[in-house]
Amino acid sequence: MQETPIWLQGRDAVVAAAEPEDWRDEAPGYEKSHELMPRQRTHEFEPGSLEAVVESIVQVFEMEVSHKKDPATWVSMVTEHFRTNVNGGPWVTAADIAATGSYNILIGDSVFYRKDESFESSHEVFHQAFPGGFFWEVLEVLSPPPFVAFKWRHWGGFDGEYHGFAPHGETVEMFGMSVAKVDDDLRLLEVEHYYDPNAFLGQLTGGCPVAHTAHTPEGADTP
């Protein structure tokens, strides 16, 4: 019997199979996801279903681009061919993601987001805003491989500060759709994302661009 490829075995299996030198800092842990996500998600899918497989692949992808420093070690994609864009914008490569950071690329140019975030600081911004975890789930898969269109939900409790804005303690959600092209082994070749980053970030800033730009990089209000 042929063994299931590592990228289809789930995020924990890919973490366990990685070498210590693959990580930017250290191997990530997903205790909060295992504990909290099952109670907070809105959809459940049978193991082995297309929905479950798509969700698992995206989880592996997100883990790798966030924590593995060298795209050559990213097993969720065909690295030399991979590209992605947001809302029909310019395509970026795996090397671009490794250098710039997935948050910076996925959010892009938004009045609610600082444009000078580094890879590291962009991740810290959202870890601080969502200390209880920032989770992601598939809602619906609309088409099968090789072009997989799917709807998704991203959510977390806004319990920490975001760029000087105090938390309100409520769950913040965003919804979107993605179209992924995969190869015969279900590795990612390209992904197009469609969602409104301002609708999401506006929930963290009270929806006021003027108020957001009135905060200094240190998070203090200007006179």
Image: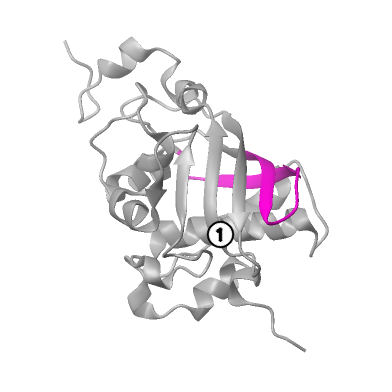
Of all residues shown, which one is farthest toward the bottom? 1
- Most foreground residue, 54 or 171: 54
Report if residue 140 is visible in the image: yes
The spot of residue 94 in percent (x, y) is 39, 57
Viewer-closest of 95 and 204: 95
**Picture quarter containing residue 192?**
top right
On the image, numbered disc 1 is attached to which residue? 188
Dot 1 crowding, Cα within 10 Å, few <14, some 14–19, many 20+: many
Q: Is residue 187 magenta?
A: no
Please say if 35 is above or below 4. above
The answer, for residue 41, to whether it is visible in the render is no
Q: Quadrant for the C terminus, please.
A: top left
Q: Is residue 71 left or right of residue 14?
A: left
Residue 88 at x, y percent in the picture: 48, 33
The outermost residue toward the left is: 223
Q: Main secondary structure of the magenta part?
A: strand
Examine the rendered structure and indicate whether residue 151 appears above or below residue 183: above
Residue at (60, 41) in percent of width and height:
178
Q: What range of the chain is rendered magenta? A: 130-153
Residue at the limit of the structure toward the right, as seen here: 46
Closer to the camera, 132 or 115?
115
Q: Amino acid at mark 1?
A: Leu
Q: Please tell me whether residue 134 belongs to the stretch shown in magenta.
A: yes
Task: Please count the marks in the image.
Answer: 1
Q: Residue at x 60, y 76 (%)?
A: 6
